[in-house]
Image (cartoon, rainbow, N blue to C red):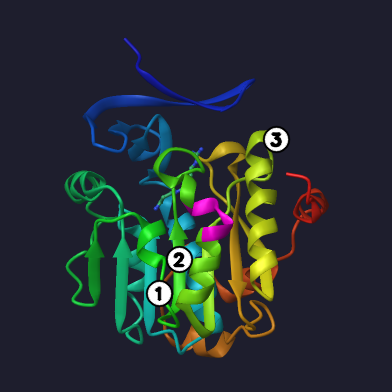
Amino acid sequence: MQLWFTEMHCEGAKFSIKVKKCVYGGESPFQRIDILDTEAFGVVLVLDGIVMLTERDEFIYHEMIVHPAMAVNPEIKNVLVIGAGDGGTIRELARYGSIERIDMVEIDREVVEVCKKYLPKTACAFDDKRVNLYFEDGLKFVRGKKNEYDLIVVDSTDAFGPGEGLFTREFYGNCYNALKENGIMVNQHESPFYPEDAKLVSNAHFHISSLFPVSRVYQAHIPTYPSGHWLFGFASKGIDPVEDLKEDYWNSLGIETRYYNTRLHKGCFALPTYVEELLKDEDY
Ligand code: AG3
């Protein structure tokens, strides 16, 4: 007998992974949580039927959501992480001795518990003394915060279900206020390829660029996400992600990565023409 997990990537295309075993399945107050053991991608975290990460390719996502910002501003000390219950983002952040405080706000306590048990290589930094974990709605947490963080990382689910509020103008505006003058916001920015996802991309970019003086988008290749072509947003009050890259500084840290490097950093902000066009789109 063969068991396959399938995610619809758009109305007419789906992506399937052969499953060795379903190791966990449950309903939290917020969503359905499944953990699958698979031949091709190792352990996979699925929320509400959507692949959040796989052991095989999560390094790409987590390195790319953290290191570009850290390589442009060595002064980052106070970080806010929103979502990211699997722990991959704080694992990458915890590699920087210069970071003093990481506030992490995850709405769903059960995601953290399940990931600690089944994805220990991802959920390995929760005990770091600099990490303060809040089980709250990120949207509410950031409301009213002023001038407090050097970096905000928005590591959300897709823009429906519990993650929906994290794609709104109100939320991005609150992040702007919560950031210090040299602050940077990085967000997972969805995929530009399938039309439904592309709408989220242009919508998010439209809001972010109306609030932040610098708003750029960069890309990575993530095999298990729709189309395998993924975007991240880099927004700041002035720091430019390419001109302000501190290449020698970052390389001197000796942080070992498997996807990110400072050569790729310069290239990943160069986007395909159809994506450039999409980002100009104001008709969402
Ligand atoms: N968060 C973004 C996952 C989006 C995947 N979308 C999809 N498969 N349709 C990942 C969380 C990792 N910390």
Task: Write the residue at 45% across / 70% down.
Answer: 152
Name the residue nearer the viewer: 255 or 117. 117
Q: Indicate the amino acid at tag 2.
A: Val
Q: How many marks?
A: 3
Name the residue nearer the viewer: 150 or 223. 150
The quadrant in which the C terminus is found is: top right
Q: Which mark is residue 195?
A: 3
The quadrant in which the N terminus is found is: top left
Q: Give the Cα separation between the discs numbered 1 and 2.
A: 15 Å
Q: Nearer the viewer, mark 1 or mark 3?
A: 1
Answer yes or no: disc 1 within 8 Å of ligand 1.
no
Name the residue nearer the viewer: 278 or 180. 180
Q: Give the Cα separation between the discs numbered 2 and 3.
A: 25 Å
Q: Indicate the amino acid at tag 1.
A: Lys
Q: Is residue 17 magenta?
A: no
From the viewer's perspective, is 44 left or right of 234?
left
Q: Which residues are magenta?
A: 166-170
- Residue annotated with mark 2: 153
Q: Can you give x and y, in whole percent of width and height, for residue 15 in the image?
A: 52, 27
Q: Can you give x and y, in whole percent of width and height, for residue 40 in the image?
A: 40, 35
Q: Residues within 10 Å of mark 2 (few under 14, many from 20)?
A: many
- Residue annotated with mark 1: 145
| Picture quadrant of residue 5 | top left
Q: Can you give x and y, in whole percent of width and height, for residue 177 in the image?
A: 50, 75
**Label 3 residue SS:** helix
